[in-house]
Amino acid sequence: MSDIQCLSRHFDQLADEAAACVVCERMRERKAVLSRLNGALDPRVMFIAEAPGRNGADRTRIPFHGDTSGKNFESLLASIKLTRDEIFITNTVLCSPRKPSGANDKPSRAEIRNCSGFLRRQIELINPPVIATLGAVALDALKLIEPHGFQLREDAAKILRWNGRLLVPLYHPSPQVVITARTLDQQKRDFRSLLKAMRAQG
Ligand code: SF4
């Protein structure tokens, strides 16, 4: 069996395991967003966001597709001419956390911890040369895998070393973040650092 066949088989096993996972109480009815639709298994960069959105990945099963965050993300990718077949996208928690009203919610610390084994195994299996976190939740979640002291406010768009690879902390492209914290134009400038990191890795 070739390396890529072996990788694909192990990835599919991991995805099946995640699909059957019901560890988080309030996400028992939700299904993990982890499949070949998440992207290339030999990506130039792995993006890690917060959680699948109700109108985005939880509905379409494709991370950052189908909602405004997805549109913003695709415009950021296009700004550095990066295509989906060159990247892999995952989330700190693989299922979609909801408020009692049904609206999107942030994952709790316990839910992030519950899912950190899946995140660690995705990173180990795919072994991306560059990781780009999207938002503070994803950056903090990496501490459960390999401790670090990076903070989004201080370290956004810096090219850092973490766990044997390059790490570029980025802001999340949600409409709320774009309005209140980092405009899309600022995020496009941040993405140029990501491009530099990818070029440095060949
Ligand atoms: S978020 Fe992760 S740990 Fe929680 S139920 Fe979904 S797959 Fe399991």
Image (tube, rainbow, N blue to C red):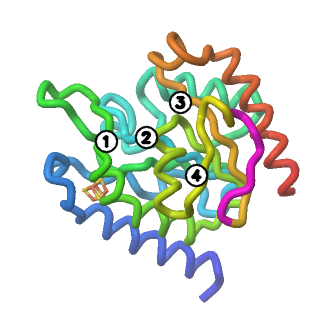
Q: Nearer the viewer, residue 51 or 11?
A: 51
Residue 186 percent across, percent down from the top left: 69, 18
Q: Which mark is residue 172?
A: 3
Report how many numbered discs are placed on residues in the image: 4
- First along the sequence among labels 4 and 3: 4
Q: Earlier in the sequence, mark 4 or mark 1?
A: 4
Frontmost of labels 4 and 3 is 3
Q: Which residue is mark 1?
A: 107
Labelled disc at residue 50: 2
Q: Are marks 4 and 2 in contact (CB under 8 Å)?
A: no
N-term-proximal mark, 2 vs 3: 2
Q: Is residue 188 above or below residue 159?
A: above
| Mark pair 4, 2: CA separation | 14 Å
Secondary structure, mark 4, is strand
Q: Which residue is mark 4?
A: 88
Residue at image point 80% right, 46% down = 197
Contact check, label 1 and label 2, Cβ < 8 Å: yes
- Residue at 46% x, 60% y is 144
Q: CA distance from mark 2 to mark 3?
A: 8 Å
Q: Magenta region: which residues? A: 156-163
Q: Of helix, strand and loop, which one carries label 3? A: loop
Q: Secondary structure at mark 2?
A: loop
Q: Earlier in the sequence, mark 3 or mark 1?
A: 1
Q: Nearer the viewer, residue 106 or 47?
A: 106
Q: Residue at x 56, y 52 (%)?
A: 39
Of pointers 4 and 2, the one earlier in the residue sequence: 2
